[in-house]
Image (tube, coloured by chain):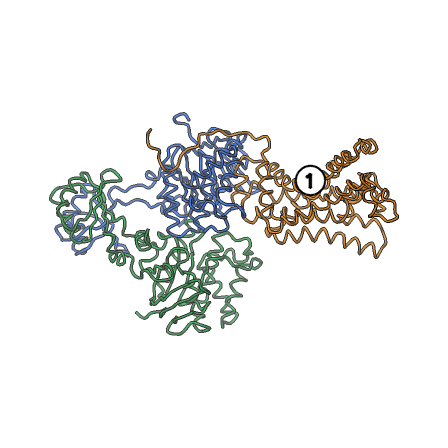
Amino acid sequence: MTAVIRTQSLSKWYGNVLGLSDVTLEIEAGITGLLGPNGAGKSTFLKLITGQIKPSIGTVSLFGEPVWNNVRTFARLGFCPEQDAFYEEMTGWEFLTRLLSLQPYSAAEVAARAARALDFVELSKDKDRLIRGYSRGMRQRLKVAQAVAHDPQLIILDEPLNGLDPLGKRKVIRLIKEFKEAGKTVIVSSHVLPEIEALTRSIILLHQGKILAQGDIHYIRDLIDKHPHKISVTCADPRRLASAFLSEPSILNVQFGPAAGTVVFETRDRDAFFGRLPRFVAESGLDVEEITSPDDNLQAVFDYLTGK
Amino acid sequence: MPIAEKGYAHWDGTFIERRLPWWPIARLGVRLAFKRKFFKPVFTVSLLPAVIFLAGIYMSERIEDFQFMFRGRSGNRLLAVDAAYFKTYFTVEGTLFLMVMLMVLAGASLISDDLKFNSLQLYFSRPLRKRDYWLGKMGTLFFFLLIVTLVPGLLFILFKVIFAGSFRFLADFPWIPLSVVAYSLLAAFFFACYTLLLSSLSKNRRYVSILIFLVYILSDVVYGIFNGIFHEPAFCLLSLKCNLQQVGAFLFRAALPYDVPWVYSFLVLAAVCALSGFVLKRKVRGVEVIK
Amino acid sequence: MTAGAMNIELKNIRFRYGKITALDGVDLALGEGACGLLGPNGAGKSTLLRILLGFLVPAQGEGRVLGYDIRSGQFRIRRAVGYMPEDDCLIPGMDAVTFAAYFGELSGMPRQEAMKRAHDVLFYVGLGEARYRPLETYSAGMKQRLKLAQALVHDPKLLFLDEPTSNLDPQGRTEILELIKDISSKKDIQVLVSSHILTDIESTCSRVVILNKGKVAAQGELAALKEIQYSLYELRTKGETAGFLQALKGRGCRVEETEDELLKVYMPPDMSRLEIFRTAEAGGVQIRTFVKSRTSLEDLFAETVGVD
């Protein structure tokens, strides 16, 4: 797959305050989650990609072309910022059409695209109301509308679910997945890790201005050697299960609890463990209620990598 | 002794019913005022007129020692400490202006900061009446205003009596203590209401500081302009300073500086206070704690 | 507190803002433990909180909070309730200790007691080291903890937390959620959390109340509300999945595979889950995740709020 975004040694300082340091990556089509602690460089990264600021060192290119001052790339880029910055005295419709008319579209096309975008985010009913009267959720959706109205190939969303109620979140998540289906590239930045997990398995983790990890969440988890995988089994007789597996050399740690009937194994060789488990269960007739991997998720990856 | 647990512990004290629930608010306001840049110098300067007038009282009693200062003229006339002396201290432009400066530094942020930083929610989710919140803020301002009005006024009376060695002053002007108190309270109440009114109008402390200063000065400038054009003394009602001087003169039984009944001046000042109450009630809405 | 007495009892509360009915007959009974308050925007959550805090008097209905009547006992309610607002709030020019002690005093604590308690509470929320620094220098996470500290300083029996994790980075979120879990584990502090982030509610609360259009749409223990489907299991496997699924179908199960490689297995009534393991073992398939299917809180929300 060809990379949509390509950066090479991308770095940015504000005076002597570090923004981003030596970031080299490629982002392909699909949904990519961008996460990191506060001050990790996420907003710097997004600003560099969208051409709002110039790198101190390094290059960034979109669709194979450099970003800076490149009108062609701007037309293919949609950005939904975190902050609310609207012209409160306009109506939703006015706002969207004014923004769209900055692109080389005819008046008719502006109207058509605006209508389609508003429909997409389900704001058609309220398009003639003043933005001042919009609720939080409506503002958020309007931001998404302005980011997609010109049908960009690359959409960047910074905290898109912020302030939305659970139903609103569902709508936006559905929209984002539709973009992916349409072959677009979406970058979603968020602090709420379960929400990123609902969208994608492909992430970029920034920390102190550098990339700590990039790729599939589970693949990254596999690479974290320092923390063996935890496997939690809830069954009728956890101690029996534990003793059966204690002799396995690949089992590094066994803990009971916290819930009753639960035992947590730590191992680096999941194949060995899961290979053995069904055999043991089948032979012993042990009634297994639940098997989970409590630390095979994004929160664990984040915690382990940013070093709690 | 069993081991104490780290972590959350309950508080086993008892709540008290304060006699003055607004007291912590006033106290905090005073503390924060002293932390402001330039406040200490301005506060010191605002005490200067009182010191000067106090010195004047001392000099007036020992006029023979100071004869060298008054070549030929009669010292007694120059430094007669009578009601007019008090009126001068209280209503001279300098004193009033210093009071305004104190308000700018101590009062601009009182409500505007609470609006800007959303602390109203914290106040009103406690057993605090809106009235107590208002009293606390007024209390901060009253503290500073009374230090420049009531305290010097009473000190003047006290020291006049001490330096004169007799109560003749009080016999001559038995109503002066009352006047001092009345004027002090009135001026303090007016300036406090004025300041809180402006402070509640904006979330930006700087705008409010400018407003406090500007409205006061402008009201005077406007009066000057209209008076210059129309030569109609009634325009003095437009100037806050003039109104204060008018009422002050009345309370100290001195000649009214402007050709307008003092009652009107009083009403103008009262109107500002009423407006302040009205605006504050609307701006400081305890109910809007949760959006 | 006598056994069986609820901390919050509301009967038939109605409230209107002019023509808009905010609450239309709300009945609530909450005892100890942590309860989540959910609802779409405009459902009446804020109004309900205002009534519980004693700011608004309901047009109809009656209620008691911590034993005090919501109409006549407003002050006493506020003394015993801690509120952690959603917006950042501070007073510039103060440090954390002065701040917390000040609000403790305003709650009715004697001055020295408030000061003592302020220190304790600030250590508890993790601001011990920073408690003498001016508040303007605080980061987002610290401000959030400060809000929690001022809500706790007067040792309330009831704690309202409004979007406690908003604007926090993943680390901050984890820490605040840990604090909330710790507080609510004390048997005598009732915690009410209002949030749009359902995973937060799931990890901290044992009960939920879902409001919609001014009424209580659902109320009860989370575990009970999220119906467990006893014969539907969700699996993740590794290995020859196709053969495994065939075998299960042969045994009479209905099987679905989602795009996320999640397998949903509906067991027939006469089958035991042990057989799934036997089938896996026979096919050389590893079962890496095995959970009883539960309605997610998100689905529960969508169902009760009746959209989608």
Give above or below for B136 relative to A108. Answer: above
Give above or below for A283 relative to A152. Answer: above
Location of the N terminus of chain B (image quadrant): top left
Task: Name the subunit of mark 1.
Answer: B
Near-viewer residue (C97 or C190): C97
Q: Position of residue C166 (x, y in %)?
A: 44, 49
Near-viewer residue (B230 or B72): B72
Any part of residue A290 in sight = yes
Q: Kindly identify which residue carries mark 1.
A: B146
Any part of residue A6 in sight = no
Residue A262, by quadrant, is top left
Q: Position of residue C303 (x, y in %)?
A: 38, 45
Element type at marker 1? helix
Question: What colour has chain B?
Answer: orange
Q: Kindly indicate which chain is depicted in blue in the rendered structure.
A: C
Residue C270, by quadrant, is top left
Q: Residue furthest left?
A: A283
Horizontal relation, residue A121 to residue B19: left or right: left
Near-viewer residue (B169 or C248): B169
Q: Residue furthest top?
A: C2
Disc 1 marks a residue whose amino acid type is: Leu
**Total numbered circles:** 1
Disc 1 packing (10 Å; few <14; some 14–19; many ≥20)? some
Question: What colour has chain A?
Answer: green
